[in-house]
């Protein structure tokens, strides 16, 4: 498909907003999607689009419509998802598109909401997903080399890509067929690493481009981070900022496929977050400098259920500090402020699609870009200084620009929004503890009686217990041995001791084990002798510890566990795991190298073979007794609980447990590891949004567990009794586990007199009437709630943050009464931020209104 000539600009200009809406809503009639130098062109009209990533298997089908609706309410036009090959083809040739894997169902749910889809097929996806989304069987195809000019790989990649395209076509889901898919991606950021593959890498990239185009989807293809993507493929940008990006041809539009809304969490890492002022700045800068499509990666991150997280050491939560949190609730003020940014950009759309921007310097680090064509005019004024606020003059008017901010002027005159001035409310999520079996429930109406039936347990034996174990001289790499059928691989050997061995110092010897990772447990004669883990930055383990050996035969059983397979980098598929040695016993007079001894291997746990996680299978292994072992490794635990009432999201707090995996009614909620702590340092109390962001700039929870709370999707729960099964690897006390519900606490807003008015008060781009002043808007987060109390209100110079506000030196005595009168008893209210309303407590000072309210 060739890039079509530009839409006649006049035609685009004349299309009223109502018709644009019709184009969107009318997703059921075939649409012609092309592009030109400015934008994607849908049915002859250039479009300014806002997109967000929601990965369908990171939530459940019952959550999809709600997430998509929140995305639409947040001002998104497009939902982007990767396609995850490993879940759709777990066994070569056996496809699965059911339940959480119902790709077509997800795409249809997006269409039902009237939004478009960007389908990033990959099929390599990275995505912090196990093995980058490749199924493990692919690795075992004879002669295969991934992501290069290799016939077996290309044949498999083409077969799966065609399968996805055919499935979408079969369901009529491409825009060319009347469906929502307007864009598709092949490969993923290959340009970041292709030099490692040399000339065959380039040949592969060109092949992938041609193969994709030959599938004839009727919509454009993109390659992200591929500066040499061949025509007609559009090369796109990924990163925290993409305003400086230019596509590789003057006939391609400037598209941003991954604007990282936060960052991912690792077990052993601190929790990353990205301030919304900086994210909004990045978005506005992109549209300011000619961009017309940007995608939040992620808009809803969700949860790495099962063993789907990549690695090594990617955590189970994939919250990502996204505008919709892991549990599906809007994160405020992030979601609301970005919604305002999207509205501001959409007000500029007629100008943005009409012309290229022209640039005017407004002084050092201050830039204006103006889109002016005929009677339309929109301007973006940016202060890219990370320290100083500025006052600039533009077209004869003066504008105050806070540091690191963009003001958006849909009529080249009035500021409708500044990216650093948040009018949207903040809400603080609260985790409501429902008690555990050692605590009294805090609310008798909720019965999360975890220990109603007590805990049963089953002991996972140390070492080899399966009949199909394999004995071989030497040490085997783990992933090639297990094919990832399980996280676990036992390595078992024995040493016979007479007593005078040179590696012995009386009965002690130093045991040294080198492993590629990720987690190692050492058992000597059936007893735990130590454990060690790698980390996200290096999975390597070097275990060294004195052990006691007995005369005669000594058993050495080593349990090696993976925590998510690598998903990124050149040749990531060949990064190994497990104990590849050397393994040595050493003492004062010599050493014994066990690396080439006879080792017996067992893939997986006995409990996995017995399906202990599946409550529908009765197994004699389970012991029900009043007392159960605690703080001992390798124990399965099982209990029954009643699902918390209502529809608030549910999580389990695994504090008290070590490391393992958990299943609710037989469905895995992922790996838990609350004992893996973030480093002590590297966090900031309050992150300065000004200045370039990076993934390590804003971190929280240093010195604390990376993840204590684990989402239990509502659809995994049933009325009445539910089963919870845990496999605990290190040792823990299940009586310490608690159930929690995610709820929204107080609603807080802080609006200054210096802010622009609420965006919805904008009347028309050619507005002649006086703009209203700023207003504070409060809204209860849940339908049916009303504002029940005003916990704090201050007009003047208040300070503090939500939950701990205090009055400043200047403060109106009427603030509380005025806000109470306007807001109590209603679901939402608006209060002008003005001395005309509150009286002036200190003239000549810029004042703010701060309110903290409770809803019930
Ligand atoms: C990108 C990649 C995504 C995701 C992201 C980090 O490089 O394309 O798939 O891994 O990084 O979250």
Image: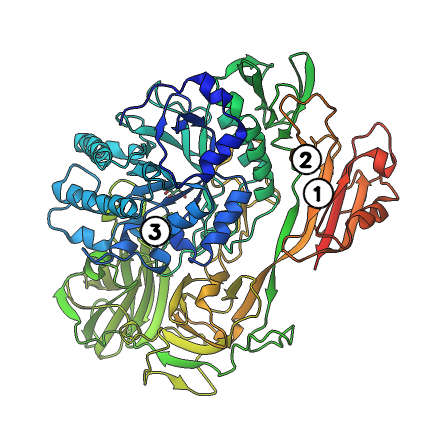
Mark with earlier residue (1, 2): 2
Q: Is residue 774 visible?
A: yes
Q: What SS does tag 1 mark?
A: strand
Tags 3 and 2 touching, CB below 8 Å: no
369 versus 780 height, above or below: above
369 displayed left or right of 822: left
Mark with earlier residue (3, 1): 3
Q: Which residue is the site of mark 3?
A: 103
Q: Is residue 310 visible?
A: no
Residue 758's tag is 2
762 displayed left or right of 349: right
576 displayed left or right of 48: left
**Who is closer to the viewer here, 479 or 579?**
479
Residue 777's tag is 1
Tags 1 and 2 touching, CB below 8 Å: yes
Mark with earlier residue (3, 2): 3
């Amino acid at each position: 498909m060739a890039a079509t000539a530009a839409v006649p600009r006049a035609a685009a200009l004349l299309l009223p907003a109502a018709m644009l809406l019709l184009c969107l809503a009318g997703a059921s009639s075939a649409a012609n999607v092309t592009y030109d130098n400015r934008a994607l062109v849908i049915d002859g009209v250039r479009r300014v689009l806002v997109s967000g990533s929601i990965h369908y298997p990171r939530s459940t089908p019952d959550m999809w419509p709600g997430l998509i609706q929140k995305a639409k309410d947040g001002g998104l036009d497009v939902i982007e998802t990767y396609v995850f090959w490993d879940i759709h083809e777990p066994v070569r040739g056996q496809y699965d598109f059911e339940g959480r894997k119902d790709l077509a169902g997800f795409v249809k749910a997006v269409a039902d909401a009237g939004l478009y889809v960007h389908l990033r097929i990959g099929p390599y996806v990275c995505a912090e997903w196990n093995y980058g989304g490749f199924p493990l069987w692919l690795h075992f195809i004879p002669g295969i080399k991934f992501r290069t000019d290799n016939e077996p790989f290309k044949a498999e990649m083409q077969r799966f890509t065609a399968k996805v395209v055919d499935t979408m076509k079969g369901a009529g889901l491409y825009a060319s067929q009347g469906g929502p898919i307007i864009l598709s991606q092949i490969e993923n950021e290959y340009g970041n690493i292709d030099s490692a593959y040399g000339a065959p890498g380039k040949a592969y990239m060109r092949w992938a481009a041609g193969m994709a185009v030959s599938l004839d989807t009727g919509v454009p293809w993109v390659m992200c981070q591929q500066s040499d993507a061949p025509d007609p493929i559009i090369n796109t940008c990924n990163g925290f900022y993409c305003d400086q990006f230019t596509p590789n041809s003057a006939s391609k539009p400037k598209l941003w496929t991954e604007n990282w809304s936060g960052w991912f969490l690792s077990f052993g890492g601190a929790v990353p977050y990205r301030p919304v002022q900086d994210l909004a700045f990045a978005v506005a800068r992109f549209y300011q400098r000619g961009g017309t499509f940007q995608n939040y990666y992620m808009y809803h991150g969700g949860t790495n259920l099962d063993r789907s997280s990549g690695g090594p050491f990617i955590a189970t939560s994939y919250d990502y500090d996204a505008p919709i949190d892991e549990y599906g609730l809007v994160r405020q003020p992030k979601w609301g402020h970005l919604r305002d940014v999207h509205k501001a950009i959409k007000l500029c759309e007629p100008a943005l699609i009409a012309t290229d921007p022209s640039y005017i310097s407004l002084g050092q680090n201050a830039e204006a870009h103006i889109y002016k064509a005929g009677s339309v005019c929109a301007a973006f004024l940016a202060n890219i200084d990370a320290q100083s606020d500025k006052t600039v003059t533009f077209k004869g008017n003066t504008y105050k620009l806070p540091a690191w901010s963009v003001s958006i002027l849909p009529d080249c005159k009035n500021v409708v929004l500044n990216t650093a001035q948040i009018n949207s409310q903040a809400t603080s999520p609260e985790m409501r503890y429902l008690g555990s079996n050692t605590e009294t429930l805090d609310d008798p109406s909720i019965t999360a009686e975890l220990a109603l039936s007590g805990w049963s347990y089953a002991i996972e034996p140390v070492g080899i217990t399966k009949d199909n174990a394999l004995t071989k001289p030497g040490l085997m790499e783990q992933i090639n041995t297990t094919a990832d059928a399980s996280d676990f691989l036992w390595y078992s050997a024995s040493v016979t001791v007479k007593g005078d061995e040179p590696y012995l110092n009386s009965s002690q010897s130093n045991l040294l084990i080198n492993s590629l990772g990720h987690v190692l447990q050492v058992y000597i004669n059936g007893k735990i002798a130590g454990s060690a883990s790698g980390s996200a930055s290096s999975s390597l383990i070097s275990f060294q510890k004195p052990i006691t050996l007995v005369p005669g035969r000594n058993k050495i059983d080593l349990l090696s566990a993976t925590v998510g397979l690598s998903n990124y980098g050149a040749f990531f598929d060949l990064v190994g795991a497990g104990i590849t040695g050397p393994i040595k016993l050493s003492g004062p007079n010599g050493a014994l190298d066990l690396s080439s001894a006879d080792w017996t291997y067992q893939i997986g746990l006995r409990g996995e073979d017995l399906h202990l996680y599946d409550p529908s299978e009765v197994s004699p292994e389970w012991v029900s007794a009043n007392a159960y072992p605690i703080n001992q490794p390798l124990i399965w635990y099982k209990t029954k609980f009643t699902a918390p009432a209502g529809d608030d999201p549910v999580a389990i707090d695994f504090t008290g447990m070590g490391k393992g995996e958990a299943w609710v009614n037989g469905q895995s909620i992922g790996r838990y590891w609350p004992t893996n702590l973030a480093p002590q340092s590297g966090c900031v109390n309050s992150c300065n949004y000004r200045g370039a962001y990076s993934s390590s700039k804003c971190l929280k929870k240093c010195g604390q567990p990376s993840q204590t709370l684990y989402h239990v999707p509502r659809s995994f729960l049933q009325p009445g009794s539910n089963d919870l099964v845990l496999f605990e690897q290190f040792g823990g006390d299940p009586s310490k586990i608690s159930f929690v519900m995610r709820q929204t606490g107080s609603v807080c807003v802080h609006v200054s007199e210096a802010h622009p008015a609420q965006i919805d008060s904008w009347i028309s781009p050619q507005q002649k009437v006086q703009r209203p002043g700023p207003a504070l808007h409060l809204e209860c987060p849940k339908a049916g709630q009303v504002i029940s109390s005003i916990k704090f209100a201050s007009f003047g110079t208040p300070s503090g943050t939500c939950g701990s506000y205090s009055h400043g030196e200047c403060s109106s005595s009427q603030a509380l009464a005025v806000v109470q009168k306007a807001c109590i008893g209603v679901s939402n209210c608006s209060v002008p931020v003005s001395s005309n309303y509150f009286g002036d407590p200190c003239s000549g000072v810029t004042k703010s209104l701060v309110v903290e309210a409770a809803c019930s």
